[in-house]
């Protein structure tokens, strides 16, 4: 396994520590995590995404989706099959937990289940206060009279 040192980037940037930690975690966990169930991630528009998980054999009641701050957890837990004795089991029915790291301001819009595919629609909604804005530069003369008046009072 290769190791990467992100400290040169961390020295010249502010506020990206969570991103560097996510990169390190993904490098560490890529060898240990299961790739089941298979999934697709698609961009469906400007700031819109869809995650599609192939969960054949599961019902919507056996699936759960949890959105926490910047993390989306999809869990599947099969109900115990009663009265079935499998001679061959080719459809995987193991319990799973699939974790997706989300960027800032990415929210789950909705989720649908059809034909054994769980689709989760995501949208990036940047609040007004987080959007870029122009900052006016003062000359310093506007703040001085207020201070002089305050001292005189």
Image (tube, helix red, strand yellow):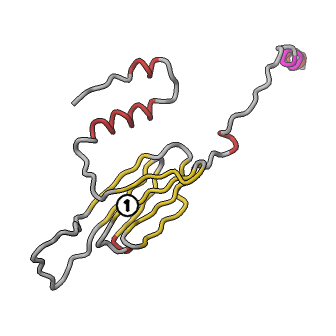
Q: Which residues are magenta?
A: 142-146
> Residue 59 sits in which quadrant?
bottom left
Q: Is residue 133 magenta?
A: no
State which quarter of the image contains the N terminus.
top left
Compared to 149, does 43 lie above or below?
below
149 or 33: nearer the viewer = 33
Name the residue: 22% across, 65% down. Answer: 94
122 left or right of 84?
Answer: right
State which quarter of the image contains the C terminus.
top right
117 left or right of 151?
Answer: left
Q: Is residue 145 magenta?
A: yes
105 left or right of 80?
Answer: right
**Element under disc 1:** strand
Residue 30, given in percent of the width and then of the height, sits at 28, 41
Compared to 100, does 109 lie above or below?
below
Residue reaching furthest to the bottom: 83
Determine crowd level at label 1: few under 14, some 14-19, many 20+ residues with C-alpha closer than 10 A: many
| Disc 1: which residue | 53
Predominant SS of the magenta segment: helix
Compared to 48, does 9 lie above or below?
above
84 or 144: nearer the viewer = 84
Name the residue: 37% across, 61% down. Answer: 53
The total number of labels drawn is 1
Residue 119, given in percent of the width and then of the height, sits at 45, 63
Name the residue: 41% across, 65% down. Answer: 118
97 or 2: nearer the viewer = 2
32 or 17: nearer the viewer = 32
Name the residue: 24% across, 28% down. Answer: 2
> Residue 55 sits in which quadrant?
bottom left
Residue 151, given in percent of the width and then of the height, sits at 85, 16
Residue 5, given in percent of the width and then of the height, sits at 33, 22
Compared to 25, does 41 lie above or below?
below
């Amino acid at each position: 396994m290769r190791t990467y040192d992100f400290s040169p980037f961390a020295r010249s940037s502010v506020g990206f520590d969570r991103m560097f930690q996510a990169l390190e975690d993904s490098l560490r966990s890529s060898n240990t995590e299961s790739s089941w169930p298979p999934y697709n991630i698609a961009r469906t528009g400007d700031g819109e995404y869809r995650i599609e998980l192939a969960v054949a054999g599961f019902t919507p009641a056996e699936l759960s989706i949890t959105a926490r701050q910047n993390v989306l957890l999809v869990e599947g837990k099969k109900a115990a099959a009663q009265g079935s004795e499998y001679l061959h089991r080719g459809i995987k029915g193991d319990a799973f937990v699939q974790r997706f790291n989300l960027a800032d301001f990415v929210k789950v819009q909705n989720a649908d289940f059809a034909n054994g595919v769980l689709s989760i629609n995501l949208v990036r909604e940047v609040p007004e206060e987080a959007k870029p804005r122009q900052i006016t530069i003062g000359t310093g003369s506007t703040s001085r009279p207020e201070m002089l008046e305050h001292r005189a009072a």
